[in-house]
Amino acid sequence: MIESHERVEQFKQEIGDMKVRDPATGRDRVFLRVGIALMAVGLGVAIAAYFMSHGTSNPLTQNDAVVLAIAGLTSAVVGGALFLRYSLASFMRFWLARFIYEQQAQTDRVVEKLGR
């Protein structure tokens, strides 16, 4: 168990030596929240444009509503892309750190077996 604790401390030190920025420092979270907001606002704008276009018989107003709906859907798609990118980045960062740790532990076990 002591060896495991030493290994964790060594892993933390190696991560510190790499000078990897902390993902909780803000930018990733801000873009994740911006993505969620863009999806919600875009969907709201598209729904409002739908009711706007069906509430009038004026073709000019209907054309404006179509443009507004396309802008809303574009906003929702961009928000979805931001959300997906930053949520996957957070998951992959965790997965990569775990994978590296497990590979080093496996290598240590193999070296220990070969040394005997």
Image: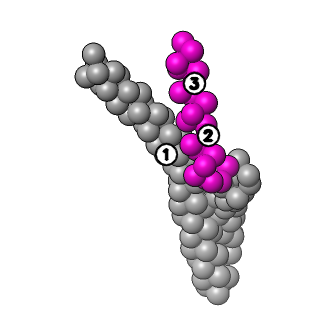
Residue that lies at the very extreme toward the top in this rendered image: 1
Q: Considering the numbered disc 2 on the image, is that residue within a helix, a strand or a loop?
A: helix
Asked whether the residues under the numbered discs 1 and 3 touch, taking CB atoms below 8 Å apart as contact, a structural biologist would say: no
Q: In whole angstroms, how far apart are the C-alphas of marks 1 and 3?
A: 25 Å
Q: Which residue is mark 3?
A: 6
Decide if residue 112 is on the left or right side of residue 25.
left
Q: Viewer-proximal residue, 14 or 112?
A: 112
Residue 65 placement: quadrant = bottom right
Q: Which residue is mark 1?
A: 92
Q: Disc 2 or 1, which lies upstream in sequence?
A: 2
Disc 3 crowd, CA 10 A, few/some/many (<14, 14-19, 20+): few
Q: Which residue is mark 2?
A: 13
Q: Which residue is found at the position 67% from the left and 49% from the top?
A: 22
Total numbered badges shown on the rendered structure:
3
Q: Is residue 53 above or below residue 7?
A: below
Give percent across and percent down for residue 52. Answer: 69, 70
Q: Amino acid at mark 3?
A: Glu
Q: Disc 1 or 3, which lies upstream in sequence?
A: 3
Decide if residue 31 is on the left or right side of residue 96.
right
Q: Nearer the viewer, mark 1 or mark 3?
A: 3
Q: Which residue is found at the position 53% from the left and 56% from the top?
A: 85
Q: Is residue 78 above or below residue 3?
A: below
Q: Is residue 27 above or below residue 17?
A: below
Work out whether residue 54 can be spotted.
no
Q: Considering the numbered disc 1 on the image, is that residue within a helix, a strand or a loop?
A: helix
Q: Amino acid at mark 2?
A: Gln
Q: Which residue is found at the position 64% from the left and 87% from the top?
A: 60
Disc 1 crowd, CA 10 A, few/some/many (<14, 14-19, 20+): few
Work out whether residue 103 can be spotted.
yes
Question: Any magenta on residue 17?
Answer: yes
Q: Which residues are the magenta region? A: 1-22
